[in-house]
Image (tube, rainbow, N blue to C red):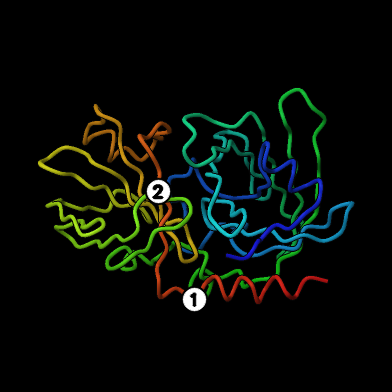
Amino acid sequence: MFDFTQGSRLKNFAKAAVVAAAAIVSFAPAATAESPFHTGVWQLNTPEGTRGLVVSDWLVFEDGLPKRWLYRRAGTNDANQFDFFTRTINDSGYTPVGIRVYRTGDNSMKYTLAPKGEDPIEITAERLSIPNFENSCLSVEKKGKRFYGNWTGTSGSKLKKLNVQKSRLTIDGEARKVAIEEVRVGRMGITEDGKPLAFLTDAGGDYAVLQWFKPGVTVEQMRDKDTEILDFASEEIVRNPGGTCDRQIESRLKAMK
């Protein structure tokens, strides 16, 4: 897997907090006509030089894999400015870092990282990718069919092989009879014997995240579009073995100046 965010103090800071910019509504899929402004591949203009930033509709990529969930902070946004909470995959709560994205042009933005108790860090960025959901492989909009079929495990999963069908989930050869329904754009709710089992959430690009529920989650909570579940038993990153987005991202990053 190639590294989407190579080197620099910025990357080190990101691993402790987050390197991100996004535009979603409380993570619940907000895209009704197109993906959020941030979705795509970006050139970050840091004091140390240019760096790559890869963001799907709801996740920031790090070291080639989706890494950090993005949740828009309600009541703090206008047409060009978006504030966010973040959460690292497999953490049970928000990261103590505020993020502000500000659109400065059709293909440019600046974003501010504001770690709690520290001075904010503002960085500008320029788009390297196509800002259209129908052509952007990082978008999750109108791509629900890709949930079904084969997935392979990654370094961010325990499973090696996953097959998803409308009434069956097969993990490393072990089949389970399930029911699958779309609970949001880009997110499937999976139940077994009428009880919520997991989310399968489109991470954008070639990836999805299998989010296993802890005991006690209700069907109503699984279907709730306004309240996020943050605490999972585990979250496993899987990859579409036939995906081409990794190669497209790599090509875009080569265009950095």
Q: Residues within 10 Å of mark 1 (few under 14, many from 20)?
A: few
Q: Amino acid at mark 2?
A: Glu
Instruction: Name the residue rendered at 37%, 55% in the picture.
Output: 185
- Distance between the alpha carbons at the discs numbered 1 and 2: 20 Å
Instruction: Name the residue rendered at 24%, 34% in the picture.
Output: 220
- Relative image position of residue 238 (x, y in whole percent): 40, 58
Q: Amino acid at mark 1?
A: Thr
- Relative image position of residue 158 (x, y in whole percent): 38, 49
Please tell me which residue lies in front, 77 or 83: 83
Does residue 214 appear to the left or right of 87 in the view shown?
Answer: left
Question: Residue 253 is drawn in which quadrant?
Answer: bottom right
Residue 99 is marked as: none
**In this view, which residue lies farthest toward the top?**
117
Instruction: Name the residue rendered at 27%, 68% in the picture.
Output: 149
Please tell me which residue lies in front, 103 or 203: 203
- Residue 257's place in the image compared with 181, above or below, is below
Does residue 149 appear to the left or right of 106 in the view shown?
Answer: left
Please tell me which residue lies in front, 54 or 141: 54
Residue wearing tag 2: 236
Q: Secondary structure at mark 1?
A: loop
On the rendered image, what quadrant is the C terminus found in? bottom right
- Relative image position of residue 14 (x, y in whole percent): 70, 43
Residue wearing tag 1: 244
